[in-house]
Every structure is written in structure tokens, then in C-alpha cells.
Image (cartoon, rainbow, N blue to C red):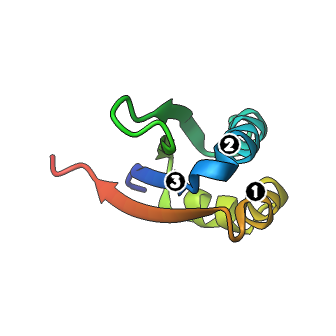
Amino acid sequence: MEQEITVVATITSSASAVHLVEAALIQVEREVQGEPGCKQYALYRNNEQPNQFVMLERWASREAMEEHGKGEPFLRFMKAIDGLADLSVTTLTKVS
């Protein structure tokens, strides 16, 4: 049985590019929600650091998550934020 994967992606924008990064995040959020195996792809802003965003993701399997990483929406997003923001990704599996 395939195990669901949860991802916490933290995107920290430079102060001068926050609006560009936010727009790219909103676009990728809309596009990815329909991908196969995507159970959740939701964008949040850090209340204490307005230039930091968190994307909470749930994938049906590791394979679905890996396919997402090769997909056009994600690749286009990465190109859009290149040099404007840092991305940190934590991948989780449920303990029980």
C-alpha cells in the first residue's frame, strides 16, 4: 500500500520581490491542485514574516509527489522565483 506524503514548503522572498513571488505562488497553487495524486496544495503567509510563505501539500504517494516536481507548473514556478526567493522543503510521512 502506498503511503501518503505530506510536504511543508517554505518560500522566503526578498522584500523587494514579495509581490512577484506571491503572484507566482498563487498561480502554481491553482494549477497544481488538479494534478494526479494531489490531495492538498494550499498557500499560507507567515503572520510574523510577511515575506515568507508556506505551501502545505498532501500527495497520495511519493510517486505522485515526484511527478509533481517534474511537471510544467512547478518548473515554471521555480523559474519565476529564481533569484527572488529561497525554497526549503520538508517531506513527512505519518507515523501511525
Q: How far separated are the C-alphas under marks 2 and 3?
A: 9 Å
Disc marking residue 41: none
Q: Residue at x 61, y 45 (%)?
A: 37
Disc marking residue 77: 1
Residues at discs 2 and 3 in contact (Cβ within 8 Å): yes
Which residue is nearer to you in this view: 24 or 36?
24
Q: Position of residue 15 (x, y in %)?
A: 58, 50
Q: Position of residue 14 (x, y in %)?
A: 58, 56
The mark that comes first in sequence, 2 or 3, is 3
- The answer to whether 2 is drawn above or below residue 31 in the figure is below
Q: Is residue 96 left or right of residue 16?
A: left
| Residue type at numbered disc 2 | Leu
Total count of labels = 3
Which residue is nearer to you in this view: 31 or 83?
83
Quick one: quadrant of the N terminus?
A: bottom left
- The answer to whether 34 is drawn above or below residue 78 in the figure is above
Q: Residue at x 37, y 29 (%)?
A: 47
Q: How far separated are the C-alphas under marks 3 and 1?
A: 12 Å
Disc marking residue 11: 3
Q: How far separated are the C-alphas under marks 2 and 1?
A: 7 Å
Element at label 1: helix
For label 2, the crowd category at 10 Å Cα-Cα, with few meaning under 14, some 14 to 19 and many 20 or more, is many
List the residue tagged with mark 2: 25
Residues at discs 2 and 1 in contact (Cβ within 8 Å): yes
| Residue type at numbered disc 3 | Ile
Q: Is residue 13 left or right of residue 46?
A: right
Q: Is residue 35 left or right of residue 59?
A: right
